[in-house]
Amino acid sequence: MRKFGLVVLGIVLFTTVATAQRKIQLDKIVAVIGNSIVLQSDIEGMNAQALYQGQHVDKCVLVQDQISTKILVQQAAIDSIEVKDDEIDAEIDRRVRYSLQRAGGQDRLEQLLGRSLLQYKEEIRPDVREMLIAQRMRQHITEKLNTTPQDVRDYFRKLPKDSLPTFNKEVEVAEIVFEPKLTKQEKDVYRDKAQDLLDRVKKGDDFGALATAYSQDPGTASQGGDDGFIDRNMYVKEFTGWAFRLKAGELSPVFESPDYGFFFLQVLERRGEQVHTRHILIAPPITPESLDRAKGRADTIYNLLDKNRKVDFFASAASFYSDNKETKYNGGLLMTSEGVENRTSFIPTDKLDPQVEAVIDTMKVGGISKPVLFTDRQGKKSYRIFYLKSVVDAHKANLEQDFAKIKDYATADKVNRTIADWFAKKRKDTYIRVDPQFQSGCPVLKNWASPEQPQPAVSSQAQ
């Protein structure tokens, strides 16, 4: 049933009315691209996805996106650009996990979908494959692009002076994190609980039922502990170490992850560089006593810092005392959350965690805060000391201060122009027909349709 193919896995709460409407529209062809087609139901499904996520998307733009995707996929076939089954499996499993969390478990998700999870995975597989191939083809088109310093200066020079972007106030903030830690005696209580559950599994108790009842991993407990297929980068090293060591059907012993607690897992199936696992997690809670110990350590280090307010001293203290593995070795500096290549220590104040912003709001450059109780997005508590390294006030863009940001803009502009030029050429030798309703009502589709000519036969299996 093709109409469900492009409904992204995150959408699990379609109404009966919306489903009925898509059924009515099932056989209407919106666009023909070579030997591929775009159905009205495809567009309705993507529009439903956007509405589910609280976004409004122009259907004309959705049609344009689908036409461009088909062209990319057809060219990828010519250029022998493919994606591996493992990559498709990983993307499907990632989306399924998200949907399971949103729906509240496998039974509820299957009820909403009206089919088994296995059936649904197979139905959306061609569309996930197509999406990944289109992404890979875009990367292939632009992979040799390089933005030189002269390109950046030329790009900036051409920007109208009255429309230069204004960058918000930015700050550099460093931290030292003191996490509450249980003593061995306190942790052994939870290790023993995990061991007891493992012993029950070995004696024949149902793994899935125990996971649902006792596992403290909110992402998998409702699924009987099922992780789907994972690769080596999806879980902490302690977990993947056992997952990729065991054979199908084998159980791991109880092991500890310092960041999460006590696990044991079972391997269900191996497939190339991926493995299908399920697990149970027992997470020791933060106790008032462990919080008090963390505060005591934080107070001690603050007193040392207060006597020696040097940047290098704070950086050294962070590397030696901080419990945050992501920041301790770069002087404790917080980094923006963008992609690795674009990460920077200069963070716009409107992107800061509100708790951090509230602390540094009254600080001067070079100031060090007293230890503050901090709660992260997962609800974990810790004590933190903050250091305000620098402040850049809001200002109009200029090359001296903002070269790296302007380079990002220049690169994006070069990528967009390259892709646009590529599509302009491909449209000339690709047959494209757009439904008259969209052709007349969508300005963005004006130049996409081919001149009138005999329509090629379209296979009923066109994707």
Image (cartoon, grey):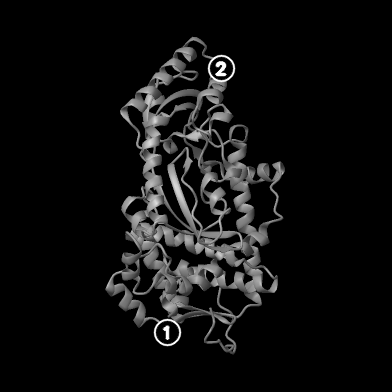
**Mark before the other along the chain sequence, 1 or 2:** 1
**Residue at the top extreme, as displayed:** 307
Locate residue 78 relative to residue 252 in the image: left or right: right
Residue 370 is situated, as x and y percent measured from the top left of the image, at: 40, 19
Residue positioned 36% across, 27% down in the render: 290
- For badge 2, the amino acid type reads Phe
Which quadrant of the rendered structure holds the N terminus? Answer: bottom left
Depth check, front residue: 71 or 204:
204
Q: Nearer the viewer, mark 1 or mark 2?
A: 2
Q: Where residue 354 appears, x then y in whole percent?
A: 37, 34
Q: Residue at x 33, y 26 (%)?
A: 289
Residue farthest along the front direction in this orientation: 203
Q: Is residue 53 visible?
A: no
The residue that mark 2 highlights is 313
Q: Nearer the viewer, residue 391 or 193?
A: 193
Q: CA distance from mark 1 to mark 2?
A: 69 Å
| In the image, residue 238 above or below residue 20 | above
Secondary-structure class at tag 2 = helix
Residue 162's place in the image compared with 87, above or below, is above
Let me know if residue 290 appears in the view. yes
The amino acid type of the residue labelled 1 equals Asp
- Closest to the observer, 172 or 91: 91
Instruction: Report which quarter residue 423 is drawn in.
Output: bottom right
Quadrant in which residue 432 is drawn: bottom right
Give residue 27's mark: 1
Q: Nearer the viewer, residue 181 or 110?
A: 181
- Tag 1: Cα neighbours inside 10 Å, few (<14), some, or many (≥20)? few
Task: Please say if the residues under marks 1 and 2 sit with CB atoms less than 8 Å apart.
Answer: no
**423 w.r.t. 152: above or below:** below
Depicted 268 relative to depicted 124: above or below: above
Q: Position of residue 327 (x, y in %)?
A: 53, 32
